[in-house]
Amino acid sequence: MAIEMNSPKTQEIPFPQEPLWQETIALLTQVNSAEILTNAKSVENLLHFNSIESRSRYSRAIATRCKRLEYQKLQDVLDLVKSGMSAETLEQVWRVLFCQVEILFAQTYLDLVWPRDPGSSLRRDEVRSYIETTFPQQSKMLYKRLMNCFKQAGYLLPEGKQDLVVVGFANLEESLLIVTHLLMARAPRTIKISEIEADPYWKFLGYRKFDHVRVAFRNAEAKGMLMRYAVVDHLEQITTRYTWPELLVKLRGPS
């Protein structure tokens, strides 16, 4: 269901912050504490923009977005970085968290971009029309901000003046396992597959078909990364094996 910006129920939905994608990724690799990322002054001291005004404005944007995340999840991501995860995996995980806190961006992605196959085209006018209809307040500014988010997050690439191309992502299995633990299972537990399918995080990762998610979980079970993937009393479910710290050690591999 569409979110109406002028609906009383949605007055508290925050306007998207500047994405500052690469700057945020860089910070995630530089700091050890979530406390730093939620403090605008601390972030400002780590940014490298020449303008003091730009550093101040952008540090507030980054700190505001990080504050919208659960503190523990943010710290978990920093621990993930320290475990030696690849830059590709970190970016995939951050895409999910970005969508979780930038609600208007996430809805636009789910409604307009996710249903399309990678490589297909999307007209800028279609995005503009969707935003004007769905979010009538501040629609011009929102269009500009969301387009910047799509570009920096890597979901869309420009093609000519009017067209955009939907981007597809590969090598998602490790990120799926990580984000499933991060969001749903910091300790071993059984999760119904229907619960996972109902959560859009796998769509934010870039999966287009849930059957591909099932395949990824079955592969994880075969590798010993999940306790089991089974149908019990007609309920399809996975059972995780590790706590979050144990998973990070396992993913790091032999030292």
Image (tube, rainbow, N blue to C red):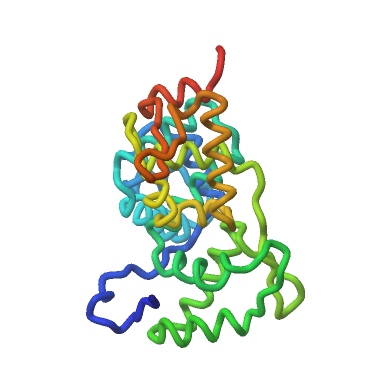
Q: Is residue 28 left or right of residue 88?
A: left
Q: Which of 63 and 209 is in front in this view?
A: 209
Left or right: 43 as drawn, with respect to 20: left
In this view, 203 is above or below 88: below
User: Could you tell whether 126 is left or right of 201 in the image?
Assistant: right
Which residue does the image show at 29% across and 43% down from the upper left?
71
User: Which quadrant would the C terminus be assigned to in this image?
Assistant: top right
The answer to whether any part of residue 182 appears in the image is yes
From this view, report whether residue 5 is shown above or below residue 188: below
Residue 110 in the image: x percent, y percent?
A: 50, 67
**Nearest to the observer: residue 20 or residue 175:** 175
- Locate residue 130, reporting x and y percent: 51, 82
Q: Where's residue 201, x and y in %?
A: 45, 53
In which image quadrant can residue 137 be found?
A: bottom left
- At horizontal 39% and vertical 65% (from top left) the residue drawn is 103
| Extreme-right residue of the structure | 160
Regarding residue 56, the answer to whether it shows in the image is no
Q: Identify the image quadrant of the N terminus.
A: bottom left
Residue 240 x %, y %: 40, 31
**Residue found 42% across the figure and 30% down from its top:** 79
| Residue situated furthest front in the rendering | 233
Rendering quarter of residue 113: bottom right
Viewer-closest of 153 and 49: 153
Q: Residue at x 57, y 79 (%)?
A: 127
